[in-house]
Amino acid sequence: MALSERTEDYLEEIFSLEMESQEPSVTALAKNLHVSKASVVSALKKLCGEGFLVQVKYGTPNLTEKGKERALKIFRRHQHLSYLLREIIGIKPDVASEIACAMEHVLDPESEKRLAAFVDFYCVSMKEERQWVARLQSGLDNPEDLSRPLLMLEEGENGRVVRITARELLRKRLLDSGFSPGSHVQCINHSCEEQLIEVTLNGTPAVMNMKEALAVWVLPEDRIG
């Protein structure tokens, strides 16, 4: 059964309160979820009707086995995402938690497995002191300017290619043309009417269309001239 984001938030918050040996009262839920008590009452009634909660009149709601199973899955998704964002990427804990809350609702089981596999592989590799982990952490601890599509370079601005986002044929064509990671480009001219961009690629003049320029991502470097 598909649940709304808000419904999942209620199940997760009730589970969290229970794990902290606190009562998931209407007042506590309203405060923690930043909603009105009337909204909490309505949501609890719906969750009881769907078999996720049991609640006697005016009493504290309790998760059923069905509710605990669903809440645990939500909790697991949140923890996978939080760990990835906080412990690996290095985002501040409060911010990482907020991002995880937004992402957890759209994370499907297959995507969660892949993310969890990466986190687990990273943890094992870190324990084994693999060289790539140190290189990854160095890059994350010293982030460069935000990369952007080549199309966003201003005339006269330079950039270093960091990745190609196109797929299949266009990706191969761009790589074969020399737009590989590490290559240097300079934007010479934007021709909006013809939807073409003149650049130099490692010092050699080249012309590309808008679609190609959107697929080549670069880190801006010092302007020349």
Image: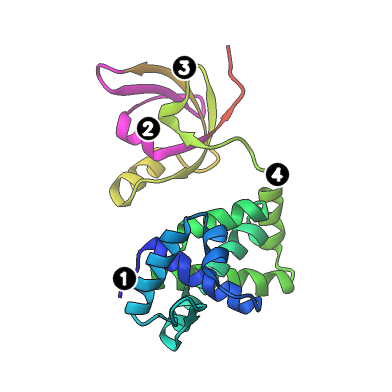
Q: Which residues are magenta?
A: 192-218
Q: Reading the chain from its start, which is encountered first: label 4 or label 1?
A: 1
Q: Is residue 106 visible?
A: no
The amino acid sitting under disc 4 is Asn
**What is the distance, in whole Å, between disc 2 and disc 1 at their CAs?**
40 Å
Find residue 23 and report its horizontal and vertical position in percent: 60, 75
Q: Which residue is mark 3?
A: 155
Q: Secondary structure at mark 3?
A: loop
Q: Nearer the viewer, residue 1 or 128?
A: 1
Can you say which quadrant of the picture contains the N terminus? bottom left
**What is the distance, in whole Å, between disc 1 and disc 3 at their CAs?**
49 Å
**What is the distance, in whole Å, between disc 4 and disc 3 at their CAs?**
27 Å
**What is the distance, in whole Å, between disc 4 and disc 1 at their CAs?**
41 Å
Above or below residue 53? Residue 77 is above
Label 4 Cα neighbours within 10 Å, binned few <14 / some 14-19 / many ≥20: few
Q: Nearer the viewer, mark 4 or mark 3?
A: 4
